[in-house]
Amino acid sequence: MALACCTLALAAQDGIKVNFKGERPTINDFAGSYLSSFNTDDEEEWIDEPTNAIKVAWDNYRAGAPQSEGVTLTVDAKNGFVLYESQYKESLLRIEMCYWNEADGKHKLFAYNVCSFMNGKGELGQYDRTSFYRYDNATKTMTLTDDIGFDREYMTDDGAVVTYALPRSGKNIDVTYWYEDGRKQEKTLKFDGRRFSY
């Protein structure tokens, strides 16, 4: 997990240029630019398994090719949301991407979220994470940010696995705490135009 975060931080130090046509970028532009920032042709550049999997699915989507067995990719341009799911037996890998328009009119916030599930319950995967990038309209670049209003946690002190669900509609993030005994607790992170809070 630490290696993945360090690699992502290094890759994002200079920011990711968002290429688009028209007046403003769409989720296709954000997702495509983010995934293109990982150069899988470079043998020395490391890419984690979930990101490589959605990158392959994205390339198939762009080419109009079928997805691999057990894989679905939903691109909801109207709502600015992308959902990748890979199901194998009782295991489900879920990757989401979306963005928010910030209240200042000068920035957008892009999120990339990886969650693992087993038998319908959240299970902490090696590369699970929720990453945020702030996009600047003037520079057309998004940069990794922790200025999001809350600290991400993936496991609590009392043993609950924590998963985040990005909004396909609305602006808030749903947080679920999955306990070993089957209990489940849910909270909502509300977006105020720049950051989130409970």
Image (cartoon, grey):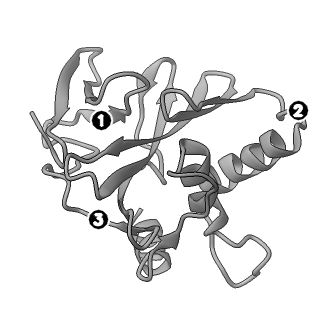
Marks 1 and 3, Cα distance to the nearest angstrom? 23 Å
Which type of secondary structure does the marked residue at label 1 adopt? Answer: strand
The mark closer to the camera, 2 or 1, is 2
**Identity, as a three-letter code, of the amino acid under mark 1:** Val
Position of residue 19 in the picture relative to residue 198 (left or right): right
**Identity, as a three-letter code, of the amino acid under mark 3:** Thr
Which type of secondary structure does the marked residue at label 2 adopt? Answer: loop
Q: Is residue 140 above or below residue 56?
A: below
Which one is in front, 194 or 71? 194
User: In the rendered structure, which disc, 1 or 3, sits on the residue that comes first in sequence?
Assistant: 3
In the picture, the disc for residue 145 is: 3
Residue shown at 66% from the left, 47% from the top: 54
| Circle 1 residue | 161
The picture places residue 32, in percent across and down from the top left corner, at: 64, 54
The picture places residue 108, in percent across and down from the top left corner, at: 34, 52
Q: Local crowd at mark 1 within 10 Å, few (<14), some, or many (≥20)?
A: many
The picture places residue 23, in percent across and down from the top left corner, at: 52, 52
User: In the rendered structure, which disc, 2 or 1, sits on the residue that comes first in sequence?
Assistant: 2
Which one is in front, 61 or 93? 61
Residue shown at 14% from the left, 39% from the top: 192
User: In the rendered structure, which disc, 2 or 3, sits on the residue that comes first in sequence?
Assistant: 2
Q: Is residue 46 above or below residue 190?
A: below
Q: Quadrant of the C terminus?
A: top left
Marks 2 and 3, Cα distance to the nearest angstrom? 34 Å
In the picture, the disc for residue 77 is: none
Position of residue 38 in the picture relative to residue 133 (left or right): right
| Circle 2 residue | 66
Which one is in front, 120 or 55? 55
| Farthest-out residue, front | 23
